[in-house]
């Protein structure tokens, strides 16, 4: 039996485009529409009855998929969950949280039970099996992360490559010539999370554009290992004068380690954050690029609602709609120069 993926391959389009043609929920060019219709007829494709019935019986619920380890938490996940819930309520939808580590099982349960109209995926990997499962189930979804492996899925994200490059360029422009970039944690890089890989690309971009000596060190989710890496990289001579950090989950521990080394921020070491959430700073006014949580949450909910076939007003002309948010340094926080001229 032909699947929507088979139709997409025959027509030379993304599976989502096939869905848009069949549902009429997007404006598609006549040429593309004819190609899809021809492929449907040639293959004898019929949309799954279960998919049709689920879409006709709306629940007014969005499923937010955030895989997490029991007992461990990330402040950003909770902030996004609240803001996405607020944005969903503005569209007349509630939110249900799916935290299965086995994300595929969770997505199958959501789609098969009819508990939600669409899914919003967080912690998206470069080759995320949840996306393939949603494609197979023909279940509407939007990603809170850029997806290069599946350009046919709607998504919104901060431009992490540009954000890291901007932070490093601004740090070098302030006079720092020995800079350490503490990237995402090694387990995030190994699992090929989009923000981690794009952050590394931004560091490489900045390294090619500046004469500063830039060293990239992966962070760690283990506080003890993070402390060891910090002590190692900040104890070299001549010492780095600036630390740019993307992995902010252990920020309080990182600050404690810097203090334990006898370093003052910003007098001895400039500290610049990439992707911070204001509430996580403990009142400190550190130079930073903030994660635009409210903007991202509102955008991804609109994309999810649009994938159902309801509200598409803000994404007209994009099929599928993608939104990459440009980074900007927070106002009122200046990166100070090194305490002594760099050699």
Image: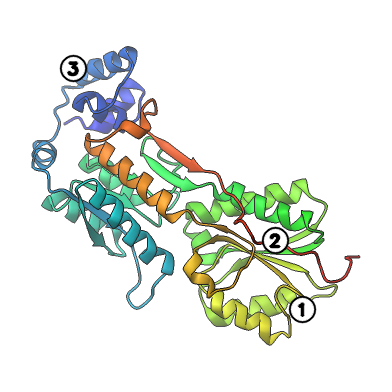
* Residue 151 can be seen, yes or no: no
Residue 259, image x, y percentages: 67, 84
| 20 or 39: nearer the viewer | 20
User: Which residue sits at x=52%, y=77%?
Assistant: 222
Q: CA distance from mark 1 to mark 2?
A: 25 Å
In this image, 266 relative to 328: left or right? right
- State the SS at label 3: helix
From this view, report whether residue 261 is shown above or below residue 269.
Answer: below
Return the residue at label 2.
334
In the picture, which quadrant includes the C terminus?
bottom right
**Disc 1 packing (10 Å; few <14; some 14–19; many ≥20):** few
Residue 58, image x, y percentages: 12, 44
The colour scheme used here is: rainbow
Q: CA distance from mark 3 to mark 2?
A: 62 Å
In the picture, which quadrant includes the N terminus?
top left
- State the SS at label 2: loop
Residue 156, image x, y percentages: 42, 44
User: Which residue sits at x=35%, y=25%?
Assistant: 13
- State the SS at label 1: loop
Mark nearer the N terminus (3 vs 1): 3
Return the residue at label 3.
41
């Amino acid at each position: 039996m032909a699947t929507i993926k088979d139709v997409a391959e025959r027509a030379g389009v993304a599976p989502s485009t096939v869905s848009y043609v069949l549902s009429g929920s997007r404006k598609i060019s006549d040429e593309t529409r004819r190609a899809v219709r021809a492929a449907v007829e040639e293959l004898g494709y019929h949309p799954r009855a279960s998919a049709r019935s689920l879409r006709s019986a709306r629940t007014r619920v969005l499923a937010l998929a955030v895989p997490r380890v029991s007992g461990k938490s990330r402040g950003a996940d909770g902030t996004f969950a609240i803001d996405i819930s607020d944005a969903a309520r503005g569209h007349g939808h509630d939110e249900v949280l799916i935290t299965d580590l086995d994300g595929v099982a969770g997505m199958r349960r959501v789609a098969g039970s009819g508990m939600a109209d669409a899914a919003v995926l967080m912690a998206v990997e470069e080759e995320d099996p949840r996306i393939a499962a949603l494609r197979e189930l023909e279940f509407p979804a939007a990603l809170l992360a850029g997806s290069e492996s599946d350009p046919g899925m709607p998504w919104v994200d901060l431009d992490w490559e540009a954000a890291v490059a901007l932070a490093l360029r601004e740090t070098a422009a302030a006079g720092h010539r020995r800079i350490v970039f503490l990237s995402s944690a090694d387990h995030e890089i190994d699992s090929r999370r989009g923000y981690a890989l794009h952050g590394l690309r931004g560091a490489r971009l900045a390294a090619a554009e500046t004469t500063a000596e830039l060293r990239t060190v992966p962070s760690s989710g283990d506080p003890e290992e993070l402390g060891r890496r910090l002590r190692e990289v900040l104890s070299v001579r001549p010492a780095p004068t600036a630390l740019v950090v993307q992995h902010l989950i252990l920020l309080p521990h990182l600050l404690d380690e810097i203090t334990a080394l006898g370093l003052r921020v910003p007098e001895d070491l400039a500290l610049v954050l990439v992707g911070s959430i204001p509430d996580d700073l403990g009142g400190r006014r550190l130079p930073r690029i903030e994660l635009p949580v409210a903007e991202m949450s509102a955008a991804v909910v609109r994309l999810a609602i649009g994938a159902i076939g309801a509200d598409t007003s803000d994404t007209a002309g994009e099929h599928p709609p993608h939104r990459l948010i440009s980074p900007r340094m927070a106002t009122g926080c200046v990166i100070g120069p090194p305490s002594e001229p760099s050699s």
